[in-house]
Image: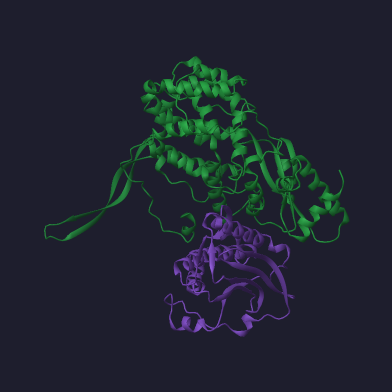
Amino acid sequence: MDDLYLDNIDEFVNDQNKIVTYKWLSLTLGVHVNTAKQMLYHYLQQKRNESSGTPLHATYLVSGKCVENGNTCHKVSVVREDKLDAVKAKMDVTISVHVYSVQRAELKDSSPLYNADYDAVKENLKNCNKYSAIRCAAAVPISSAELQRAQEMALVPPAEKEISKPGLNENASATSKPSAKQPAGIMGMFASKNASKSQESSKEVKTEQKVDSSLVETSKSKTASKANPMSNFFGKSAQKKADEKPNKSIKEETDGNSTASATASMKQSQTSAKSEIDIKEEQSKVTNALKVESQDTRNKTKRPEIVDSDDEKIESQQKKRRRIKKPQPDSSDDEVVPDSPPVPNVHTPSPKKQVKREPVSHQESSEVKRRKRRRVLKSKTFVDEEGAFVTEKGYVSESYSESEEEPEPNSQAKDSSSLKQSFGKREEEKKEKNQKKTSTANKPTKQPSIMGFFQKK
Amino acid sequence: MTTLTRQDLNFGQVVADILCEFLEVAIHLILYVREIYPSGIFQKRKKYNVPVQMSCHPELNQYIQDTLHCVKPLIEKNEAEKVVVVIMDKEHHPVERFVFEISQPPLLSISSETLLSHVEQLLRAMILKISVCDAVLDNNPPGCTFTVLVHTREAATRNMEKVQVIKDFPWIVADEQEVHMEEAKLIPLKTMTSDILKMQLYVEERTLKT
């Protein structure tokens, strides 16, 4: 290829002081993303060899396998150049490294990286994967007729949406692109909060699971009346994608509700209200096959709302999430939903988990609701014989459950602890929904420290 | 297409709201990028659909909010010409001045469907430019402080001195040494033009900073 692109990049970086990301470059010059990555690399090489003029800074995208907390996970992160070697050394296997962006400014945080290609991506939203290397043949937009029908169905169970709403709202909040900086001290508090927020919002898998479980409950009450239109819906949608293997198995399952989006409906059909184990195992195979594709489509369709978090620990989080989610379908014992298994490239005993679901959920609930008694300083106000108000303070033994303990505010600046804390918070949210809390959370009485206002956020 | 005049105060209030929100975000971002305060007090928040750094310190936030609360009436009446964020070294000599030049067209003609999203896009670009401004500016000496100055048209400040918009938050006429900077270099950052607002952002930087 000719070298005009080097001049182009030079103009963008030096004259216009832009942050040139590979994504923006590929959309602007109309080239494939891999070509854009190479262009940036060559430009960097050339400028560094010249060793004159303004200093350039670059960020890299590193992905690979690493072991954290004893779990193998696939980690994708955007790192600054000075941290690149350290991050590569931490990984067991480095699968890919490429230039993410080139800019003159030394970025203090990763927010401008997201801002840099926001507009370009938004303009090309319909065909944002035109130059991308990620492909999925099944990801086609559904026709307007089907969309209408899906919306009518979605209007029917409005009450059940309440549970799914908090999850979906978290999903909608934008997260910035990950930065590899390891904060320490004061920053550690902020890092943990950011990590928890980004992890909460980035797990579309989980929110879809939530939607699945809530809609399954409605489907149980309405299967009889809705069975026929539903089967028609699935019949039609299955016909559209008849060439796909998983859809043949979906055709056999005619029960189930649908949601507005096609990908969700695919998953929805898998989590239909049939309690036979053989169908569930079939579903697990189906979800296995579709999982990779649906994740890809999700990546594509939700481009502006970046899903990347600091460390995308898909497998470990899914495992933990499955355990937390189990108590939820407690009320509907017979028709418990099989959660979708994790990405197939990491081997996990997912079918076993489905069979063991019933005993696990019971065990889970007993773990969750371990109640203890402890003495708490409480004040009682009453009227004494002279008609005066008297306030007495005394120790009262009160029962509380483990989950009501507040999480440690001063977390270490390590990913594992921030992960744990985010899970601690998530567990609390989940359990709060399950338990009917009659006792208030018991806060230990202590002097508020000067760092108190940091914790409010 | 609706044509409104300055008398349509309701719309003037909308413009002032938008601008004051933007200035708040911009001031926080300037404090973060120029390292006036340690980065530990900043937290990522979302504005215009992108992440921005805002401070969590309550007193700092209150100060900035009070400042902009007083500036808002001036913007509503289109009396504010420039809002300047001055960064000063330990001896209170300015080292950098971030100047937001504001002008509003007297006749506002709006086609409301895409107006606000267009304005949001422009403000997003301004935010991006502030984030990368450290490429064109030299580093500041340690121990800098900041202040906000407002240049008004005509004599609008006389009213401000008479009427305290916020109690115990008086505005005073700025010292000469804060307003004028010796050996200043002008570095333009971004210009935005829209139906409701025209804004220019440039930095005046002192040649020798330490």
Left or right: A241 with respect to A231?
right
A368 above or below A256?
A: below
Q: Quadrant of the N terminus of chain A?
A: top right
x 52%, y 68%: residue: B64
**Residue A100's spot in the image, x, y percent?**
72, 46
A41 above or below A68?
A: below
A27 above or below A137?
A: below
Taking depth in this image into account, of B10 and A355 the one nearest to the observer is B10
**Residue A294's spot in the image, x, y percent?**
59, 31
Taking depth in this image into account, of A24 and A338 the one nearest to the observer is A24
User: How is the rendered protein coloured?
Assistant: by chain
Taking depth in this image into account, of A164 and A59 the one nearest to the observer is A164
Left or right: A202 with respect to A9?
left
x 30%, y 41%: residue: A438
**Residue B134's spot in the image, x, y percent?**
70, 63
x 53%, y 77%: residue: B79
Residue B28, image quadrant:
bottom right
Taking depth in this image into account, of A175 and A361 the one nearest to the observer is A175
**The chain in purple:** B
Residue A137, image quadrant:
top right
**Residue A94's spot in the image, x, y percent?**
73, 37
- The reply to whether residue A158 is visible in this rendering is yes
Total labels: the figure holds 0
**The chain in green:** A
